[in-house]
Amino acid sequence: MNKRTKCGVTYMSFDIFEEMGIKHGFSTRLGGVSEGVFSTMNLGFNRGDSDENVRENYRRIAKALDINYENMCFTRQTHTTNVVIVDKSSAGNGIVRANEFNDVDGLITDEPDLPLVTFHADCVPVFFYDPVKKVVALSHSGWRGTVGKISKVTVEKMAANFGTDPGDVICGIGPSICKDCYEVSADVAEALKSAFKASDVDRILRQSIFNPDDKDKYMLDLWEACKIALLEAGVKEEHIEVTDYCTRCNPKLFYSHRVMGTDRGSQAAFISL
Ligand SMILES: [Zn+2]
C-alpha cells in the first residue's frame, strides 16, 4: 500500500489495484478544510463538523481520486454482514440526497462511474475487484463484521449475482487498527473462536501485550482474520494485498476511534469502475 498526494489531498492506495487502473483510495486526515478535532479531511457527516466542510472535503477527494462526486453511494454501517447490490438508482445516496439505507455494511456494483463509499476509524475497509466480470465492492469489517466474515459474504454475493469466479477476485485489506494495538476482551475472543477453525484462531488471537497477566484480554489481528475469510471464499493468496498502515499507530495521518473516542473525524474508502 502506498501513500499518494494528488490535488493537495493525501490518500492511500493499493499497488494491486493501481496496476489494473481501478479508481480507488482510502482517505487520510490530510488535504481537507475541517478544523479542530476534525482537521482536516473529515468525511463523516453528523459528527459535529459543518456539512459544508464535509462536502468540500468530498469534492476535494473526488477530484484527487478522479471519481464522480454526485454519483457516490454511501453505506449505513451498523456492524452487520448485510451487503447490497447497487445500480444507477442509488447514485448520490447519502451525498446529494438522503441516505436510503438501513443496516448496510457492504456495497457491490457493476455500474461504471458509481463510486462506492464506506466509513472507517479503526475498522477494516476491504476492497474487491473482479476484472473478468467487471464488478467492484467494498465492505466494512470491524470485529463483529469479521466474526460474521463479511469479506466472504461479499465474494459469495458477487459470485451469486454476477457469476464472479472467486479465483479472479483482487482484494485489498486497508488501514485499520493493527494487531499490536487492538486489545479485545473475552466475549470478542469467544465469538471469534466460534467463527474460525482452531488453527486459524491461533493466527488471529494472542495474549494481551498490555495486560499479559489477564487471561481474559487478547490482541486481535483483524487483517489476518479478514485474509482468512477471503481465502475461505476462494480468493487466491497472491490476489490479496494487505496494508501495513495502522490507524491507531499514526494519529497524524488517521482518525482513530481508540485514540480519539467519538470526538473525531472519519476516514472513507472509495472504489469506482
Ligand atoms: Zn497499531
Image (cartoon, helix red, strand yellow):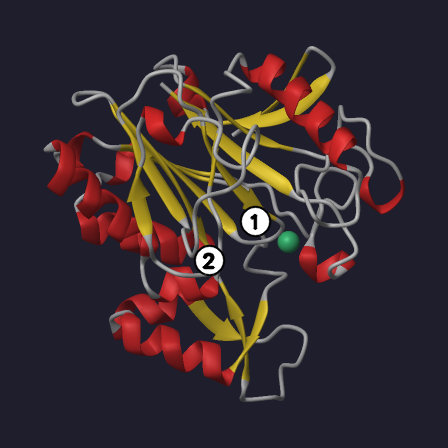
Q: Would residue 167 be found to the left or right of residue 42 on screen?
A: left
Query: For numbered disc 2, what is the local secondary structure?
Result: helix
Query: For numbered disc 1, what is the local secondary structure?
Result: loop
In terms of depth relative to the viewer, which is nearer, 177 or 64? 64
Residue 148's image quarter? bottom left
What percent of the width, then of the height, locates residue 55? 69, 28
Nearer the N terminus, badge 2 or badge 1?
1
Q: Would residue 262 be found to the left or right of residue 106 on screen?
A: right
Tell me the residue that label 2 is attached to.
222
Instruction: Report whether residue 129 is seen.
Output: no
What percent of the width, then of the height, locates residue 181? 63, 61
Q: Give the spatial CA distance, label 2 vs label 1.
A: 8 Å
Q: Would residue 262 be found to the left or right of residue 234 on screen?
A: right
Tell me the residue that label 1 is attached to.
176
The reply to whether discs 2 and 1 touch (Cβ–Cβ < 8 Å) is yes
Instruction: Report whether residue 80 is seen.
Output: yes
